[in-house]
Image (cartoon, grey):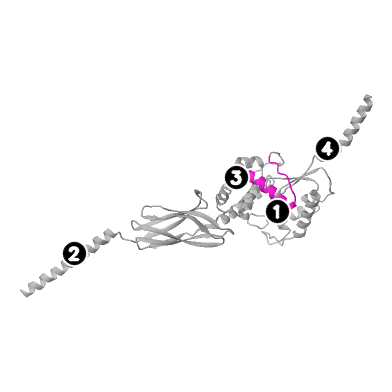
């Protein structure tokens, strides 16, 4: 009897063991970032990885099977989607990956259709580092990664921030960590008044700088690219700096606000004079239409003549902190105070009367 029980258990374990092993099969679809933050691809190396004999190709060009779990970085899939259409390279070479990328995407959708799919945080960042630098932003990376992957695969996928699906540690240096934080904060401030897909995507793509898959050269290269892209994005909402010559005690000066985003934006504009020579008015709830310029009339009252500056700052309607870096307006007033004018005019009249009196006395002396 004992032998029969032992044989039964052994047979059952033999049958179930392959299934358990198969259930534990995890396939990770990740790769270092290839697309710069300004749009073009650094090179065409990703194409080789997508071929059937490449690193990413070997993972997807295999027979369909059950009991697999695919762990995928949506940022990589977004790059491949872009590559399957029209894309440009940062080098002089001609792009050659359109058909290869299209075939890889089709195979990825086919081979994962019957399996569980888990979306990594967008950009596959080092989770521990992201928690230290920006814990609230990490939550957005997970949400954005799941949304983008569901769109790309056309199906529901899981997101499990509490499970350690990510592997590896980032070697991002302290100066580059500061650059990441500065760029993240700049985009966070801008997002208080701007809600566009391009801003949301750039904000999410900063996570790629924290990826363990980047080597030292790539970390520096893409960090510079991210800084340039953030500056360009922030500069889409701005006030034109200017120099003004004021010749009257009260005047309205033109101030131009520019919105290069594809959505209307509502902001407050604070005008802060650096000295007490002038008084200026600020603006509340200013609506700047998409892709347009709006000219405002800034009321200026001169207290004393001379050179002064005004800090023009764009803020959110519900927050007094700046959205984009302020600009400086330079005002040079040559207005003379009215009391000085009256004194000068009175003195001139007195001098004229004295001259007339002197002339009259001279004429009388001659007549005598």
Farthest residue in the bottom direction?
367
* CB atoms of marks 4 and 1 within 8 Å: no
For marks 3 and 4, give the CA distance: 41 Å
Q: Residue at x 27, y 58 (%)?
A: 339
Which mark is first along the chain, 4 or 3? 4
Which is closer to the viewer, label 3 or label 1? Answer: 1
Which mark is first along the chain, 1 or 4? 4
* CB atoms of marks 4 and 2 within 8 Å: no
List x then y, in percent, for residue 94.
71, 62
Residue for badge 2 = 350
Circle 3 packing at 10 Å, graded few (<14), some (14-19), many (20+), is some
Callout 1: helix, strand or loop?
A: helix
Which of the image's four quarters has the C terminus? bottom left
Residue interval drawn in magenta: 136-161
Farthest residue in the top direction?
2
For marks 1 and 2, give the CA distance: 84 Å
Which mark is first along the chain, 2 or 1? 1
Question: Is residue 85 left or right of 246 when viewed as pictured?
Answer: right
For marks 3 and 1, give the CA distance: 24 Å
* CB atoms of marks 3 and 1 within 8 Å: no
The image's mark for residue 20 is 4
Question: Is residue 199 left or right of 267 when viewed as pictured?
Answer: right
Residue for badge 3 = 177
Q: Residue at x 70, y 53 (%)?
A: 78
* CB atoms of marks 1 and 2 within 8 Å: no
Question: Is residue 128 left or right of 61 when viewed as pictured?
Answer: left
List x then y, in percent, for residue 20.
83, 37
Residue for badge 1 = 78
Which mark is first along the chain, 1 or 3? 1
């Amino acid at each position: 009897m004992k032998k029969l029980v032992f044989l039964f258990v052994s047979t059952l374990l033999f049958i179930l063991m392959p299934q358990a092993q198969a259930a534990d099969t995890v396939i990770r679809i990740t790769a270092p970032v290839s697309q710069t933050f300004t749009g073009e691809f650094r090179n065409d190396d990703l194409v080789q990885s997508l071929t059937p004999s490449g690193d990413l190709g070997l993972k997807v060009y295999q027979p369909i099977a059950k009991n697999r779990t695919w762990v995928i970085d949506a940022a990589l899939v977004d790059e491949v989607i872009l590559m399957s259409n029209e894309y440009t390279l940062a080098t002089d070479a001609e792009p050659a990956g359109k058909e290869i990328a299209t075939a890889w995407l089709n195979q990825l959708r086919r081979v994962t259709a019957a399996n569980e799919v888990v979306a990594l945080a967008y950009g596959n960042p080092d989770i521990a580092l992201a928690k230290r630098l920006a814990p609230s932003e990490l939550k957005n990376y997970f949400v954005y990664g799941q949304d983008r992957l569901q769109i790309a695969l056309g199906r529901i996928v899981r997101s499990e921030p509490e499970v350690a699906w990510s592997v590896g540690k980032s070697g991002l240096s302290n100066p580059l960590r500061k650059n990441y934080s500065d760029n993240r904060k700049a985009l966070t401030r801008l997002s208080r008044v701007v809600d566009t897909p391009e801003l949301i995507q750039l904000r999410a793509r900063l996570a790629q700088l924290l990826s363990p898959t980047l080597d030292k050269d790539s970390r520096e290269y893409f960090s510079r690219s991210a800084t340039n892209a953030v500056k360009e994005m922030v500069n889409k909402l701005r006030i034109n700096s200017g120099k003004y010559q004021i010749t009257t005690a009260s005047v309205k000066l033109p101030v131009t606000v520019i919105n290069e985003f594809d959505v209307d934006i509502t902001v407050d504009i604070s005008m802060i004079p650096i000295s007490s020579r002038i008084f200026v008015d600020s603006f509340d709830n200013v609506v700047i239409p998409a892709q347009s310029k709006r000219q405002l009339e800034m009321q200026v009252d001169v207290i004393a003549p001379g050179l002064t500056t005004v800090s023009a700052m764009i803020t959110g309607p519900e927050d007094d902190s700046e959205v984009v870096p302020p600009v400086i307006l330079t005002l040079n007033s040559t207005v003379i105070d009215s009391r000085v004018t009256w004194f000068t005019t009175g003195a001139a009249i007195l001098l004229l009367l004295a001259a007339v009196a002197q002339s009259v006395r001279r004429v009388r002396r001659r007549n005598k």
